[in-house]
Amino acid sequence: MNILIFTNTFTPHVGGVARSVEAFTTEYRKRGHRVLVVAPEFLDMPQNEVDVMRIEAIQNFNASDFSVALPLHSRLTETVDAFQPDIVHSQHPFLLGMTALRLARYRELPLVFTHHTLYEHYTRYVPGDSAALERFAIELATRYANLTDQLFAPSESIRDLLEKRGVTTPIAVVPTGVLLENFAAGDGRAWRRQMEIPEDAFVIGHLGRLAPEKNLEFLAQAVADFVHARPHAHFLVIGAGPSEDAMRQTFADAGAEAQLHNAGILRDQPLADALHAMDVFAFASKSETQGMVLTEAMAAGLPVVALDAPGVREVVKDGKNGRLLQDPTPAAFSAALQWMAELAPGPMRDLRKAALDTAEAFSISRTTDKALAGYASIKARPPAGASEDARDWEDVFSWVETEWEILKGFAGACGAAMSASLSSEKE
């Protein structure tokens, strides 16, 4: 099968969608499928990429670490003609996602869309952020989903949410799988020495983009409160982003700055080593659609303390492989960390074993099976017209119809956002 993937984020960008595309692409190719990834340019891109087409893009859009692809793609038609895709898979409802929709409709190819993101949590990166813009983001993603042939939801919680929002396209639950072998072994002791963390310290860890939508102000406060009175406790953070300075300030205000260690962005074996230097993984985001970093942490044998949220509750089972907290307060989070720190060796081993079992259930092999089954479930499109004249007319009609549906989707999303805004003003 030739799989054409459109994504607005890809390596070297660090984020869930980029890692998801990379993981599935690798696994598809292992199984003998061809994959062409269409993605924006990013700074420090890998050299000599195979079957990756880069689109010119605006770098660091609105002071973020995202790239925004420009609308004109002069080489795309020629590249796709040569690739001859069997299926188109869009990772976003906008930018290159719109290109994916146009291309799939024009070429009569099945279109799959993975609803990776709760886009209303990311409107802060767009000028004019408001409640109306949040509603627009929800409506746009919903209407886009209903123009596709098959929807992948990364978790049961997101599937249920999308159905409540009015998605009628068939939905399959397909999480991003974890590459177990990437996290199974690591030299945690050496990493502690490198970060100047005592060998006998209780180390709380976190991995991810350090951005406001990840609820890092809460997490930093909860962990700083915990380590402040416990000199043997340390916080090891893997990642980078706009919230890094605020996290450092929170620890400085708590008098615990020396107990915060930021390793920056890590990949491959250094990432595994850093995870194995931790005793417990801490996670407070409520904007996720799946617990991707949670399964990666569990693949390293780490129990997790997390706030209950969509995509998290499918992974963290309270008292089994970690703690899933219903009380979203720093005090409750700190108490859960204390519970972990006081566990006897036997119960802690049980938590670690359950974490490894959870990671196995979310392995990339298993989730790829689900993705390929989703591809196979899409009904074949009707055959093209017999005559060349009829084919030309169908091409024009298909183009007009697709553009009209895109415009209707935008107009409908705008209308819903404006109606919500006017209703709130009347209240």
Image (spheres, rainbow, N blue to C red):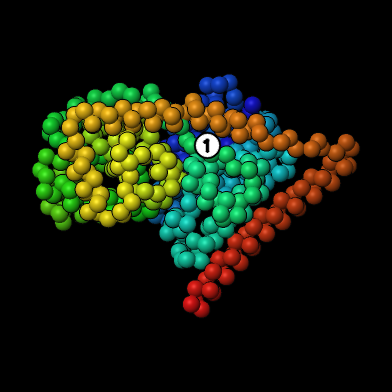
- Can residue 119 be spotted in the picture? yes
Tell me the residue that label 1 is attached to: 174
Q: Which residue corresponds to the image point at 84% horizontal and 41% vertical from the top-left?
A: 391
Q: Is residue 412 left or right of residue 359?
A: right
Task: Give amino acid for label 1.
Answer: Val
Q: Nearer the viewer, residue 332 or 285?
A: 332
Q: Quadrant of the N terminus?
A: top right
In terms of secondary structure, where does tag 1 sit?
A: loop
Q: Which residue corresponds to the image point at 27% horizontal and 29% vertical from the top-left?
A: 350
Q: Which residue corresponds to the image point at 33% horizontal and 31% vertical from the top-left?
A: 355
Q: Which residue corresponds to the image point at 21% horizontal and 28% vertical from the top-left?
A: 346
- Can residue 41 be spotted in the picture? no
Give the percent coordinates (x, y) of residue 400: 75, 53
Give the percent coordinates (x, y) of residue 161: 52, 51
Give the percent coordinates (x, y) of residue 134: 49, 61
Q: Is residue 291 left or right of residue 240?
A: right
- In the displayed structure, would residue 317 be above or below residue 411? above
Give the percent coordinates (x, y) of residue 415: 61, 67
